[in-house]
Amino acid sequence: MATYVITVIGDDRVGLVQSLADAVAAAGGNWERSELAELVGKFAGLVVVTVPDERSEDLAAGLRALDGMLEVHLHEAGTPAQPAADTITVTLDLVGNDRPGIVHEITSAVQARGLSIDRFESEVTDAPMGAGTLFSCRAVLRGDETAFPLVRADLERLATELMVDLTLAAGDDAA
C-alpha cells in the first residue's frame, strides 16, 4: 500500500468533498484522515489516503480530473518521526483582544524554547457588545518536557502584555 497526502484548495461550492471521495474510491483507496475547511469563500484541506501500489496512477489521474474545480497536489507521505522518550504534548488555549502580530508573538515564544507546533487552529470573532474583535487559538505543542515550564513562563508574560486568557494543559486535547 502507498500512503499519500492530498492538498486541495479552490472556490467553495457544494460537492467538493464528494468529488475527492469519488477519486479516492475509484482508485480503490482508503480515506484515512482529513482536515478540511471553508475559509472566507475558499475550500482548503489535507487528506491522507492509502491506495494499493498498483493503483497509485489511477489516484493521480482521478485527482487531475478535478482540475478547474480544485487545485490538487498529491504528495507521497513521509515516515512519521518517532518522539524521544522525554517528549510530551501540551495543549495551549488562548483568548483575548485581537491585534496584528499576535500569532507571530505566540509562535516566536514557542519556537524560542525548541517546541514543535503539531496543530494550530485560530479564529477572530466579534467581541460581545461591540467591544472590538477577539482572537482565539488552540495549539498542540510537542517537545522536551523540561522546556514546558520555560515556555509557560514566556507565554504567561506575553498573556499579561497582550491582555489574553491563557491555558496550558498536559496532553493532546485537540486531537
Image (tube, rainbow, N blue to C red):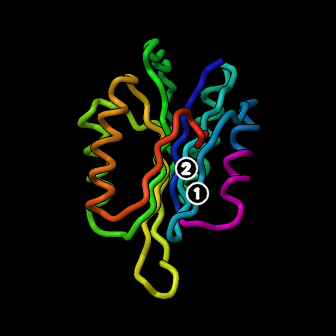
Residue 150, image x, y percentages: 29, 34
**What amino acid is labelled 2 in the image?**
Gly
Extreme-top residue of the structure: 85
Residue closer to the observer: 78 or 28:
78
**Local SS, label 2:** strand
Q: Please say if the residues under marks 1 and 2 sit with CB atoms less than 8 Å apart.
A: yes
Crowding at dot 1, Cα within 10 Å, few <14 / some 14-19 / many 20+, comes out as: some
Residue 146, image x, y percentages: 35, 23
Location of residue 40 with respect to 71 vertically, above or below: below
Which quarter of the image is occupied by the C terminus? top right
Which quarter of the image is occupied by the N terminus? top right
Residue closer to the observer: 28 or 127:
127
Q: Say which mark, if any, is on residue 45.
A: 2
* Horizontal relation, residue 163 to residue 34: left or right: left
Magenta-tinted stretch: 11-21
**What amino acid is labelled 1 in the image?**
Ala
Residue 16, image x, y percentages: 66, 57
Residue at figure coordinates x 28%, y 53% from the top left? 158
Residue at figure coordinates x 43%, y 30% from the top left? 142
Quadrant for residue 134, please give it.
bottom left
Crowding at dot 2, Cα within 10 Å, few <14 / some 14-19 / many 20+, comes out as: some
Q: Which residue is mark 1?
A: 37
Image mark count: 2
Query: Per the image, is 20 magenta?
Result: yes
